[in-house]
Amino acid sequence: MMASGAPHCPPAASTERVVPVRFYNQSRLSENSLQAIVQIANRVWAPYRIVIEMSGKGDGINIVVSGDDASAPTGDGGAPTVIGTTMFSNGHATPNIHLSVGAAEQLVNWSADKREPLSARPVAVLDAIVPRVLGVALAHELAHYLLDTSGHSREGLLRGRLSLSEMENPQSSRLRLSCAQRQALFGQ
């Protein structure tokens, strides 16, 4: 039983909402890698019945995937600061998202701890990890767009910094939307 005055957290939408995305790939990633990015983002958004579909034309969200330059800006301790960004204009999200392969690779390398360094890893290993990291980054950026907010939360999908383990092994229980975010998403 819900306590009096407690907010009602709406369930997922009763019908699927399709979100078309169009990739502009300026990186070494293959078409299969781009599809893997979308699959991971779909896994994160599945509990909310949001379906991301790759589209080549028409309305949609533009996703620019930039190069392989691993010299992306870093924050304290050398950790990458920006893997994905959503463009805003006049305080509102625009349908333009940027994903950085270099920053994703840098995060993988920076977080390596006792693993072998990025440069020593086979390309096939990177080709498996980097799309997962970028898929979670895309899911995060889509939350900014769909909720029309530049803000971050203390937990869940819109947290300002997600760990490599959360990005390598995305779990909806750790990448969820808050009740307030669900209310905003479903217009309740």
Image (cartoon, rainbow, N blue to C red):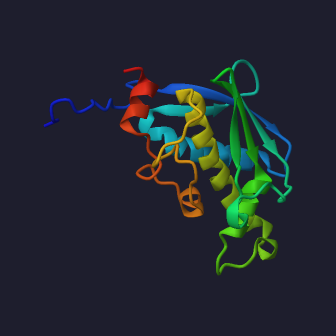
> From what the image shows, is residue 82 above or below residue 107?
above
- The answer to whether 105 appears left or right of 8 in the picture is right
Q: Position of residue 108 (x, y in %)?
A: 69, 65
- The answer to whether 33 appears left or right of 40 in the picture is right
- The answer to whether 142 appears left or right of 180 in the picture is right
Residue at (46%, 47%) from the top-left corner?
A: 156
Q: Position of residue 145 (x, y in %)?
A: 60, 30
Q: Quadrant of residue 125?
A: bottom right
Total numbered labels: 0
> From what the image shows, is residue 84 above or below residue 80?
above
Residue at (62%, 38%) from the top-left corner?
A: 141
Q: Nearer the viewer, residue 89 or 108?
A: 89
Q: Position of residue 31 (x, y in %)?
A: 77, 45
Q: Quadrant of residue 122?
A: bottom right
For the question of whether residue 24 can be seen, the reply is yes
> From what the image shows, is residue 160 above or below residue 80?
above
Residue at (56%, 30%) from the top-left corner?
A: 149
Q: Which residue ends up furthest to the bottom in the rendered image? A: 114
Q: Quadrant of residue 34?
A: top right
Q: Quarter of the image for the N terminus: give it.
A: top left
- The answer to whether 58 appears left or right of 137 in the picture is right
Q: Position of residue 83 (x, y in %)?
A: 70, 49
For the question of whether residue 128 can be seen, the reply is no
Q: Quarter of the image for the C terminus: give it.
A: top left
> From what the image shows, is residue 134 above or below residue 50?
below
Q: Which residue ends up furthest to the left in the rendered image? A: 1
